[in-house]
Image (cartoon, rainbow, N blue to C red):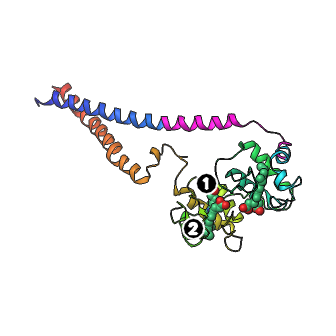
Amino acid sequence: MTDRPGSRARARLLCAAAVLVAAAALALAAARGTGSVVASSAQAAASTQTGSDTGRQVFLRDCAWCHGTAGGGTSRAPSLTDVGAEAADFYLRTGRMPLSSPDEEVRSGPPSYDDATISALVRYVGSLGAGPAVPTLAAGDIVNGRKLFGENCAACHSASGTGTIVTKGEPAPELWHTGKQQVAEAIRVGPGPMPPFGAKQLDQQEVDDIVAYVHQLGSPQDAGGAGLDQYGPIIEGLIALFVLLPCLVIVIRLLGKRAPRRSREEQS
Ligand code: HEC
Ligand code: HEC
């Protein structure tokens, strides 16, 4: 009984430590949250051009000299009349178009336009002919997606989607950062040396399954909370097990012990 003040002090220390750890975890989560909010508001601020005519105007200014004023194609670039909104959305959102010269290599990168301008251009290219619309995604089955990805895509993109080299020396890119919509579009469009997959090879449900699988490969979006810097589920689990759980146990034990002690003191 003589060690009671000592153990109380120790308990207080432990409690303070637990609170500190929890606060640090919260601060980390908050910092990540603000980071992405700042980034997305910067993107929103970059959005300037809107309006129904924008698509046509930007097309005439930036695309027509290669693809023709009505999108019918020239010696520099193929016709766009029947590629549809689907291909336009893919080529613009993965930064493949516009090229600055007809000999330039078609490469993915940051998009050249803000979101609103891309949407306007996509609508305009879609209105040129009878090509496919931008695909509508539904929830997919990751397990089946993994199987289909292994059968149809892994040979070029590797099983973990990190990309590899295909036969003609053209690199198959890493897929971790490709948007869901663009993965679905790529499957149908087949950019460059990649073969297009028609509805007979992969139906819409199978496309959704592959998209779901590819989407979780690099887990770039943390819709459900702090991602702990993408260290992955194992590290996250270890942190939960060895940091957060012990903190919780300490707090529970402290709460559980105090009550009977106090009542004994009151009785005596
Ligand atoms: C300097 C010339 C050039 C300019 C400018 C250009 N493109 Fe292209 N575009 C090409 C070439 C060349 C291809 C074919 C690339 C390939 O298939 O490897 C192409 C392909 C495309 C495709 C894919 C067509 C298909 O068959 O699937 C789309 C969609 C497209 N361009 C849209 C656009 C849009 C929209 C713009 C304007 C924002 C634009 N391009 C500007 C040269 C150009
Ligand atoms: C024969 C090899 C090959 C196969 C099979 C293949 N791809 Fe590709 N893929 C490529 C190449 C090469 C590119 C780059 C094309 C370019 O940039 O013009 C590419 C590009 C892509 C992109 C665009 C990535 C970006 O961010 O720009 C996506 C998404 C994609 N592939 C998904 C798939 C999926 C899903 C499958 C299976 C259904 C698949 N690919 C099958 C070779 C392949």
- Chief SS of the magenta region: helix
Number of numbered discs on residues: 2
Residue 74 lies, in percent from the top left, at 85, 59
Which residue sits furthest left?
Answer: 2
- Cβ of disc 2 within 8 Å of ligand 2? yes
Query: Eyeballing the image, is 233 above or below 140?
Result: above
Left or right, residue 224 beside residue 266: right
Residue under the image location 72 percent in, 37 percent down: 47
Q: Which residue is mark 2?
A: 156
Query: Eyeballing the image, is 195 above or below 230?
Result: below
Q: Residues within 10 Å of mark 2 (few under 14, many from 20)?
A: some
- Cβ of disc 1 within 8 Å of ligand 2? yes
- Tell me if residue 35 is in the magenta stretch: yes
Residue 5 seen in the current view: yes
Q: Which residues are magenta?
A: 31-55
Residue 225: numbered disc: none
Give 226 or 105, whichever is nearer the viewer: 105
Q: Quarter of the image for the C terminus: give it.
A: top left
Q: Which residue is mark 1?
A: 178
Q: Amino acid under label 1?
A: Thr
Residue 207 lies, in percent from the top left, at 65, 65
Ligand 1 positioned in quadrant: bottom right
Give 168 or 262, whichever is nearer the viewer: 168
Q: Residues within 10 Å of mark 1 (few under 14, many from 20)?
A: some
Q: Quarter of the image for the N terminus: give it.
A: top left
Disc 2 element: helix
